[in-house]
Image: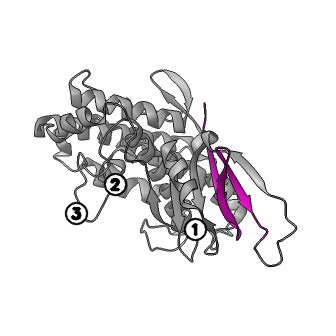
Amino acid sequence: MIKRTLCIENPCHLKCRNNQLVASYEHIKGCENIPEKIIPIEDIGILVLEHQQITISHYLLDKLVENNAAVVTCNETHHPSGMLLSLEGNTVQSERFKAQIEATEPLKKQLWQQTVKAKITNQSKVLGKWDIANNYLKTSAQSVKSGDADNNEAKAAAYYWSHLFPDAWQFFRKREGPPPNNLLNYGYAILRAIVARAIVGAGLLPTLGIFHRNRYNAYCLADDIMEPYRPFVDVIVRNIVDETSAVDVLTQGLKVKLLKLPTTDVIIDEGTSPLLIAAQRTAASLAKCYTGEQRKILYPEMP
């Protein structure tokens, strides 16, 4: 079942009734006559709370995390700022925690090699969609060493970002940089929630990364595993800038395009799957790598 991604952009009170999320407007000035909106909690994969005047009941939050939904909060600029996930995402969680914690350095280096190779391969395919020269990336992907000892990821990124967008944009990738960095940031935040949710569902610790290590980052593993998925966000953003140059403000229309990310088709294990489901398969395969059941992470390929 493909879970829904909901984005609440207006003032309202969110509560739970009969295992359903209820958006109520009866106490919102000027909105008292708007009828309630009701969605089954079991259908929700990600809930994005955008407006600063949204209130939410603790009971609803508990029901959402019980169903392994990721709840994303946004700041006053409408950019994601926090995330709530379940602490009990899998019945064999403690067993997988132990395997993850005890993972050897050689294993982690092999897993990171696979991750970087998959990311650069997908980046090369993104450039290929716009007939942009990508042989450098193809070669780079094939030459990634254990642990990415030669830093192919960074070298490939420099080439990729200097070629992805039309020259007129004079684009450089920086989180606080000019548009369309704002679109990329929003898309990556949604992607991070998708991957973090999948990791928890697979019974893994999202804090304990393969490569990323930051004492202040609660989602290091999500930041690792999402790397090969980032190019799927990049495709959406490149399509947007091909359609319009009006991207200074993250409008509702632009967000709608980015929020379609979970249902984007990807190729995984020689079959087609929505990205949300692919992320779950990636996380499950990683858990098996930690427990020694398999040696390779299952990553998506760009169609």
C-alpha distance separating marks 3 and 2? 10 Å
Residue located beneath label 1 in the image: 168
The residue type indicated by label 2 comes to: Tyr
Task: Tell me if mark 3 has few (under 14), some (14-19) or many (20+) residues whose alpha carbon lies within 10 angstroms of its own.
Answer: few
Q: x%, y% of residue 90?
A: 38, 35
Q: Is residue 137 magenta?
A: no
Q: Kindly report which numbered mark, 3 or 1, lies closer to the viewer in this rendering.
A: 3
Q: x%, y% of residue 170?
A: 51, 69
The residue type indicated by label 3 comes to: Arg
Residue located beneath label 3 in the image: 215
198 left or right, relative to 78:
left
Q: x%, y% of residue 73?
A: 52, 64
Question: Residues in magenta?
Answer: 1-26
The residue type indicated by label 1 comes to: Ala
Task: Tell me if mark 2 has few (under 14), some (14-19) or many (20+) residues whose alpha carbon lies within 10 angstroms of its own.
Answer: many
**Which of the 4 image quadrants contains residue 48?**
bottom right
* Badge 3 element: loop
Looking at the image, how many numbered discs can be counted on the residues? Answer: 3
